[in-house]
Image (cartoon, grey):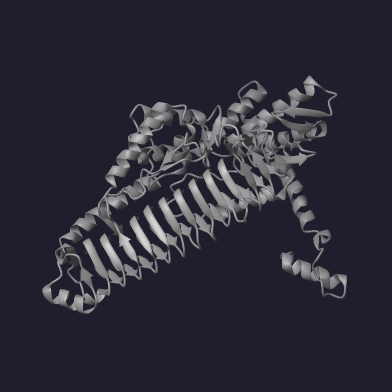
Amino acid sequence: MGTSFDFFFCGSAISSFIRIFDCINRKQKMSRLRNPTASEIAALEAAGVTAEAWSQVVVNDDFDPSQLQQCRLEGSIELASGARIRRSCVRNYRIGENSLIEDVTALECRRRSTFGNGVGVAAINECAGRTVRMTADLSAQIAYLMAVYRHRPQLIATLERMTEAYAEAHASEMGEVGRDCRIVGARFIREVRIGDNVTVDGASALENGTICGGTRIGVDVKAYGFICAENAHVDNGVTLENCFIGESCILDKGFTASESLFFANSHCENGEAAAIFAGPYTVSHHKSSLLIAGMFSFFNAGSGANQSNHLFKSGAVHQSIHLRGCKFASGAYVMSPAIEGAFTMVMGHHAAHHDTTDFPFSYLLEKEGHSVLMPGANLTSYGTVRDLAKWPARDRRTVKRDVIDFEEYNPYVTGAMLRAVDLLHRMEEQDPKAENYIHNRVQIRASAVRRGIGLYNKAIVASLGAMLAQGTTSERYDGSGRWLDIAGQYIAKREVDRIVEAIEQGVLTDFAAIDNRFRVFDLHYDDYARSWAESVYTGMLGHTPTREELTDAITAGENTRATLRRTTDADRDRDCSTEMSVGYGIDCDDETERQADYRAVRGLE
């Protein structure tokens, strides 16, 4: 990465090494595998066990016939130490140490399979123009390159070849169940590779997939062409088709998804997703919520939130981008194509194809059938403060394959605010007497323009001060220029360009190496962010800032952050005020008791 030669073992690399060692251990254990003896076969058959060919069944040296009861073995079967099969039909599978297969209608591998690796997912655009091909080690950053950088055909072709090589390397005619698994009460499991410590309890149909370590698949789940990353939880009637479920994701309560990618810590229930790229922390809990043909991250969908991705003309060809931290209020509707700036609250119906990219922390409202923008209004909301604090607190990951940055003050969002201030000033200059302005098909009232400039300027001072106070100054870490949010990672665009070029030129030859480059940047994020802030501050001053000027900027940032925090605290206080105690203490005899009930329930003591 530029002049940096750091190397950092990423989750993908570690996972690869673990698999290599597992393969070595498995081969070593193979030398201890043997066919059942004649006496063992007799005991097995007496216990209701049948085999298509006992010569194709191999067991560990310490095998005991009690491990198998009333089951049917077909094709090649390998049983590790302590593996148990009861009342199930198993074909062409290796069963790992101490794993239990019980009451499974069919656990079978009837063909050579890649176990979901290489399956294409038509994310973001239903017409498959942004198809991401899955692997068990897929990171949010690599998926982002596959989906978004279609203007770089050589990059896409190279990533496709890497995917094909990965899928071929993981293909087999034998399915696998790892160590310490519990596969019980399931109906059909076909061509599914199952990692260690996995629970499958009551699933209806699982086909052509990989289930990584620590994952739980529950009752009535149906999944076809899928990959579940480490410690995912899929339960209660969820239906998946061509989907990637990232690390520590939760899909529950009848949620349905097709052609979609969900990355770390996403949590979706009840509703539906179709052709979405759900970056980290995409959340949808409510019925009747439809996420379709879009990109999300750190997102929350209210009840009945909906989108439309075709205009009954050319078909489902359109897409929407909802940048980091966007929220849809209950009943919100967006007609694609559209894009909202980071941390925007969307309320009402919007069908004019808005583009508010350069206005983060805004409210997008519907008034009299028009889309109305309140720039920067979300900077005064305690909800934003709460969101920024809750995401790292709710990080359930252990592998951490996806790079996720939680920094409140960062070059990506601050750069957008700088552009917003410039745009708002130009609006006023072009028509100082206007009461309303139009920008990319949204209305902005003159009063909202003035308020937005003030809010953004405060936030810019706070952000620059915070970034100048972190990291170290070094020519090695040049963070100047435009920054991007790559599916949860804040990163300088010039570094993404270098990574892309290294892939195209054959310098980065596998996914682990690509992930490592993203992780090396993240390791030095503070230094790059400081570099960016220094370059911006230099532009503002017209000269390189002195040490005293840097100190002044840091102090100003601290003071402004305190001012902004007092504003958001006041918003929280309003939400916790006595005026909000309506409906509490309904059986109380006086105001004191009613307020006591309110404080007790809200935890305000």
Q: Residue 76's spot in the image, x, y percent?
A: 21, 60
Is 85 left or right of 485, judged from the image as shown? Answer: left
Outermost residue on the left side: it is 38
113 or 211: nearer the viewer = 113
Q: How many marks?
A: 0
Q: Residue 551's spot in the image, x, y percent?
A: 64, 35
13 or 123: nearer the viewer = 123
Seen at 78% across and 70% down, the residue is 597
Seen at 59% across and 38% down, the residue is 309
Q: Is residue 3 visible?
A: no
Q: Quadrant of the C terminus?
A: bottom right
Q: Quadrant of the N terminus?
A: top left
Is 295 left or right of 445, judged from the image as shown? Answer: left
Residue 158 sits above or below residue 13 on the image: above
Q: In which image quadrant can residue 36 be found?
A: bottom left
Q: Residue 462's spot in the image, x, y percent?
A: 67, 38
